[in-house]
Amino acid sequence: MFYIIGLGLSDEMDITLRGLEAVKSSTRVYLEAYTSILMIQKERLVFTLNLARKEAFYGKSLILADRDMVETQSDVILENAHKEDVSLLVVGDPFGATTHTDIILRARALNIPTRVIHNASIMNAVGACGLQLYNFGQTVSLVFFTDTWKPDSFYDRIKENAELGLHTLVLLDIKVKEQSEENLARGRKIYEPPRYMSVPVAVSQLLETESHRKSGILTTETLAIALSRVGGGEDHQRIVAGTLGDLSMHGEEAFGEPLHSLVIVGKRLHHLEVEYAESFAVDKEKWRTVAKDLYGCALD
């Protein structure tokens, strides 16, 4: 059996009981390590025989699965999975990335039985900011711009959501085990340091795109909510609300540690959403004023 198991959002204890049982039954356990990250280091997950220390929660050694292994060497992961249990652990929920759908299809093509064990992901935990999940439209990804590559297809999705008054969850880019253009061209397996897009960079790119597209959906007065390490508790989770202009004025440290996400608030805004998110606002009075005057939200 090939298991693909969601780990949830925070640390090793977020795995479900069903997922933990699958891990314990597996002869090999892979940890997918590039579409997202846990809030802990790999070493805390690894089994130890030192009885003087607390046994690591999963009770298994882990094999790190990078992009190359998952996307081009899936046969290594799936080897013998038709006659023994093999698990692939992924942060969040298994269907939060297209890559995971692809490896399930490959397993099925090899007649390997598969089972998906779900968990929380940012797609539903984003409700922690106070916005209602049923008021969200399409989710988009925002990648790092370069001098020669500034894709803006995300803008059309945000615009479609905005026209319906819906919120947009923007997933900010992660660069893990990436090669420079030079090293890629020369075939050198030299990788750049990991990079995680910050909220100020995301806001800058959104406003830059608006300056070219000129539809008026992303302005300095557009309400937005930044989230980091959702599910990590008071020590890790950070939520900051304001206009895009407000958020652009704050340094990266104001938004907590990565990973970061950003919500563009839609105009089908309920007063309970405004009131809940107000506790996260950098300027509470301005938050309410913009919600009332520009978004037409009825507030007492």
Image (tube, rainbow, N blue to C red):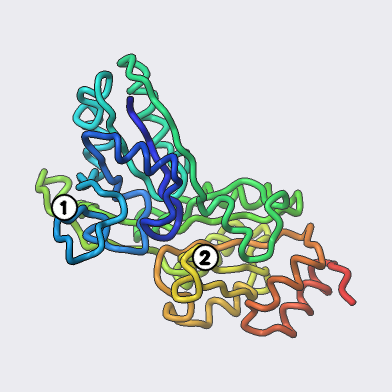
- Image quadrant where one finds the C terminus: bottom right
Under mark 2, the amino acid is Glu
- Image quadrant where one finds the N terminus: top left
Residue designated by label 1: 182
Can you tell which mark lies on residue 126?
none
Verify CB contact (< 8 Å) between mark 1 and mark 2.
no
The answer to which image quadrant residue 143 occupies is bottom left
Along the horizontal axis of the image, is 96 left or right of 111?
right
| Disc 1/disc 2 C-alpha distance (Å) | 27 Å
Quick one: which residue is furthest to the front in this view?
A: 51
Residue designated by label 2: 208
Residue drawn at (27%, 62%) of the image: 41
Coordinates of residue 83 in the picture (x, y in percent): 25, 19
Under mark 1, the amino acid is Glu
Coordinates of residue 137 in the picture (x, y in percent): 66, 48
Vertical placement of residue 32 versus 85, above or below: below
Coordinates of residue 239 in the picture (x, y in percent): 56, 72
Q: Is residue 61 visible?
A: yes
Residue drawn at (48%, 40%) of the image: 118
User: Element type at marker 2?
Assistant: helix
